[in-house]
Amino acid sequence: MVVESDTAPTFTATLANGDVEAFDLADHLGDGPVVLAFFPGAFTPPCSNEMVALQEHLGEFEAAGATVFGISADSAFSLNAFREEHDLGFDLVSDMGREAIDAYGLEIDIEDLGLLGVANRAVYVVDGDGTVSYAWTTDDPTVEPDYEELLAAVEAAA
């Protein structure tokens, strides 16, 4: 599992930004902090709550120069529908190949919901040098991060 002070693993995946495009994390490093918010599944209540909360703080993240990405194993098409339903102003990353989920050591199964091989809920802040300056994970994927603490970490990384 990735921890603070590690070099952030870069990865390629599919970007869901209203369209469907190739995504390479390396292309987004160096221009300010990057927030990577891994979540288990689109359209589930805790994940919807988290992404909406990130949207509510998006102006503050952007004011600190940060770029926010939500990341899950859902398809880009599902993520675009999810993004549209919740009017999210940040991009989502489809990691169906589990490259990012594996690189960050976050794969879990939530058998009760039939979610297998999905991302555990976790948030990382990657600074301009590509170093993880903040890492938050949970043993309970229904728990959300402390958004004020996350914002403070973004501001410190700016």
Image (tube, helix red, strand yellow):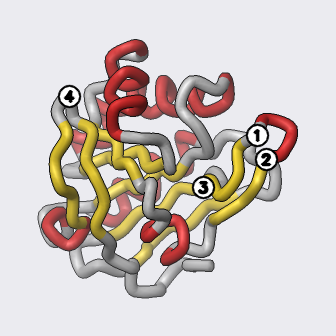
Marks 3 and 4 close (CB-CB < 8 Å): no
Which residue matches tag 1? 114
Q: Earlier in the sequence, mark 1 or mark 4?
A: 4
Give the CA separation, mark 2 to mark 1: 6 Å
Residue 20 is marked as: none
Which mark's residue is nearer the viewer, 2 or 1? 1
Q: Earlier in the sequence, mark 3 or mark 1?
A: 1
Give the CA separation, mark 2 to mark 3: 10 Å
Q: Secondary structure at mark 1?
A: loop
Residue type at mark 2 is Ile
Marks 2 and 1 close (CB-CB < 8 Å): yes
48 sits to left or right of 125: right
Which residue matches tag 3? 119
Q: Earlier in the sequence, mark 3 or mark 4?
A: 4
Residue type at mark 4 is Gly
Which residue matches tag 4? 18
Q: How many marks?
A: 4
Disc 1 crowd rating (10 Å Cα; few below 14, some 14-19, many 20+) is few
Marks 2 and 4 close (CB-CB < 8 Å): no
Q: Position of residue 139 (x, y in %)?
A: 80, 57
Which residue matches tag 2? 110
Q: Is residue 89 above or below residue 11?
A: above
- Quadrant containing the C terminus in the rendered view: bottom left
Give the CA separation, mark 2 to mark 4: 28 Å
Give the CA separation, mark 3 to mark 1: 13 Å
Considering depth in this image, is 24 or 33 the residue closer to the camera?
24
